[in-house]
Amino acid sequence: MELKIYSPQDAGFIQKIDWNFEELKTEISAVAQEYETSVYTDDTIGDAKADRAKLNKFKDALTGKRTEIRKKLLEPDELFGQQVKELTGIVQKAIDNIDGQVKGYEERKRNEKLDKVREFYEDNILDLAEYLPWNRVVKPEYGNASKTMKSIKEEILALIQKVAEGIAILNEVDSLYAGDMKRVFLQSYDIGAAMAERNRLEEDEKRRKLYAEQQAKLKAEREAKRQQEAERVMSAGRQSMPETAAQPQQSIPVMETVEDPVHVLDFRVYVNAAQKAALKDFLKKNGIRYEPVPKQ
């Protein structure tokens, strides 16, 4: 089968379009040169527009003629292209028939090979299947004819050994983060990543404990400072009281009997607003009950 062109032969194809190029070029150059040096005033702007329109019309005529000739030249090619397309369509039907059978054969052989690979996997995975399932082992290229069974088996055995060793190490780890380590390991089967995760979590815990200790220390310091301030205010209030200010009245025995008796004391203090607030805060912090003195 061979495509043969009977007409036109190589010498019969149009090599050049003969037309009055040089003659027209001379005429156009002369006219264009005149317009290139033309100067128009406000009074002759109408002439400028008319000249521009005339030149644009001539330019469009040249372009239109080229399009017309190009269309005529392409007419034989248009018919030729349709005929070639018809022939290639006939050939493509035959190709499709063969291609379907070839692809069917290749797919069948691919599946047969993958079945053998899976059989090898199941014979060797033993009790590690929950950590290394089939879908984490199989690769698209395992079905390719170019990938040998020998290389596939070596890869699978190496991966199974890697997972087995990693799980064995993690089962011996005594750490609060053993579960997190195993989770990270099963994502990539990288024991180094699992160890790095433990270190990261331990460092985070150290930082949390240090922060908690610092906060507790600050809280204790603030509490001590408030206690000292309350005592200072109380002391200042006692020093500023007149001698008759704190005259304890009668001591009333406690109403209930407990190991540490509670006494009720009625006395009067003289304080300013700040001292009053500090005294009230001191009584609350120390769990001392207080109430207004009943009027007699």
Image: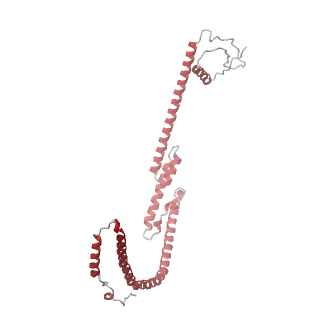
**Badge count:** 0
Q: Does residue 179 sit above or below 255 in this rendering?
A: below
Q: Residue furthest bottom?
A: 6
Display coloring: secondary structure
The single residue placed furthest to the front in the displayed view is 43
Q: Which residue lies at the image location 53% right of the left edge and 29% below the top edge? A: 219
Locate the C terminus by quadrant: top right
Give whichever of 195, 53 is nearer the camera: 53
**Residue farthest toward the top in the current orientation of the protein:** 243
Looking at the picture, does residue 47 appear above or below residue 170? below
- In screen coordinates, is 119 left or right of 246? left
Toward the viewer: 219 or 248?
248
113 or 48, nearer to the observer: 48
Looking at the image, residue 247 sits to the left or right of residue 173; the answer is right
Q: Quadrant of residue 286?
A: top right
Where is residue 257 drawn, in percent x and y? 71, 19
**Percent of width and height locating residue 195:** 46, 47
Q: Residue at x 40, y 86 (%)?
A: 76
Identify which residue, 112 or 63, lies in the foreground: 63
Q: From what the image shows, is residue 180 above or below residue 97?
A: above
Task: Give coordinates of residue 74: x percent, y percent.
Answer: 39, 83
- The residue positioned 29% from the left and 70% from the top of the image is 36
Asked if residue 148 lies left or right of residue 44, the reply is right
Quarter of the image that includes the N terminus: bottom left
Q: Is residue 99 above or below residue 237?
A: below
* Residue 90 in picture, x, y percent from top left: 47, 84
